[in-house]
Image: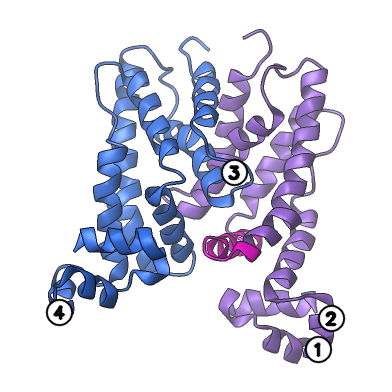
Chain colours: A purple, B blue
Amino acid sequence: VLDAARALLEEGGYPDATIEAIAARSGVAKTTIYRRWPNRTALVVDLLVEMSTATVPPPAGKDPLLALRIELRQAAAVADALEGQLVGSLLGEAQHDPEVRAALLQGIFHPRREASAKVIRQAQASGALRRDVSPYVVTDLLFGPLFFRMLVRHAPPTVAFVNQVFDHVMEGLRPGK
Amino acid sequence: VLDAARALLEEGGYPDATIEAIAARSGVAKTTIYRRWPNRTALVVDLLVEMSTATVPPPAGKDPLLALRIELRQAAAVADALEGQLVGSLLGEAQHDPEVRAALLQGIFHPRREASAKVIRQAQASGALRRDVSPYVVTDLLFGPLFFRMLVRHAPPTVAFVNQVFDHVMEGLRPGK
């Protein structure tokens, strides 16, 4: 079912991927799909979670700052791919649909934010990052500029851009400042 | 006409402020409204420009860094007011409507970005800010985290938050680093 949804999204974009079309493409009955996902949003959020877990895995590794930089770079690398388009479409709907917002926050933004905050705490514990800053503020400093460009599109959300963002933010967060 | 639109937006939100309703409320014929604004989006963008020019004036004053901090604080102060709601609604539509995106970029984001970049160049010329950073990257570093919170709503876009953002970003952009 998720593969069928993905194929439809890649071909015709968000408006074309209705539950009807997904049922037809996957050969799975609509009632069966609705047993697992209450609505299209829930299904698309699940697909986005699956795709982004593969292309932008949660930060991991021995060096926490390197792990964060890699996560940010990988997020920028899919900003123009289907992952980025889905984030845009879903956040667009979230502006007038509280259920879409709740599904996005619960499925993607809150879990990812906790994973990043954990790594930021490791960097703070190891002395790589000043400790008097909230880890959640640090995630917003790093990811905010990328999402700003992704959603407004006043300038391209490139890997080169997030590398600059990372360097400047980290420069201001070094210990002893 | 803009006053009527504003009243409707404040009462019923974005979906209620149709050209039909605006015509009825203002007593101005629909054809007259369409002579000035090609569609509802253009009208709402004009209203947003008018409102935000009053509540978040472009940065000005002798101290460029202070002017930027004030601009950012004023933007956060209206994040939950009608201005912030309209930015959310319009950017939500922009995700699937290229004309809305173009109107927003041309009416608001590009002019404001140029105004901020000009002040950042003044700060660089006066030695208050390092010169090897693009002024446009600096605007994204400052405003990105605020818009990220405004649009995703994983955490509140408060004045206290943007004050922290400003301090950390500026710490990393001091000259001699």
List the residue tagged with mark 2.
A35
List the residue tagged with mark 4.
B31
Mark 4 vs mark 3, foreground winner is 4
Q: Secondary structure at mark 1?
A: helix
Q: Secondary structure at mark 3?
A: helix
**Circle 4 marks a residue in which chain?**
B
User: Tag 4: Cα neighbours inside 10 Å, few (<14), some, or many (≥20)?
Assistant: few
The residue segment tinted magenta is: A81-100
Mark 3 vs mark 2, foreground winner is 2
Left-right relation of B177 to B139? right
Left-right relation of A76 to B87? right
* Point 79% across, 49% down: residue: A57
* Point 51% across, 20% down: residue: B167
Q: Secondary structure at mark 2?
A: helix
Residue B22, compared with residue B116, is above or below; it is: below
| Mark 4–mark 1 distance (CA, rounded to whole Å) | 48 Å
Mark 3 vs mark 2: tell me if same chain. yes
In the rendered image, is residue A157 in sight? no
Q: Earlier in the sequence, mark 3 or mark 2?
A: 2
Q: Tell me the tag on residue A31.
A: 1
Kindly identify the amino acid type of the residue bearing the numbered disc 3.
Answer: Val
Q: Is residue B2 magenta?
A: no
| Mark 1–mark 3 distance (CA, rounded to whole Å) | 42 Å
Q: Nearer the viewer, residue B18 or A40?
A: B18
Asked whether the residues under the numbered discs 1 and 2 touch, taking CB atoms below 8 Å apart as contact, a structural biologist would say yes
Question: Horizontal and vertical percent for residue A118?
Answer: 80, 33
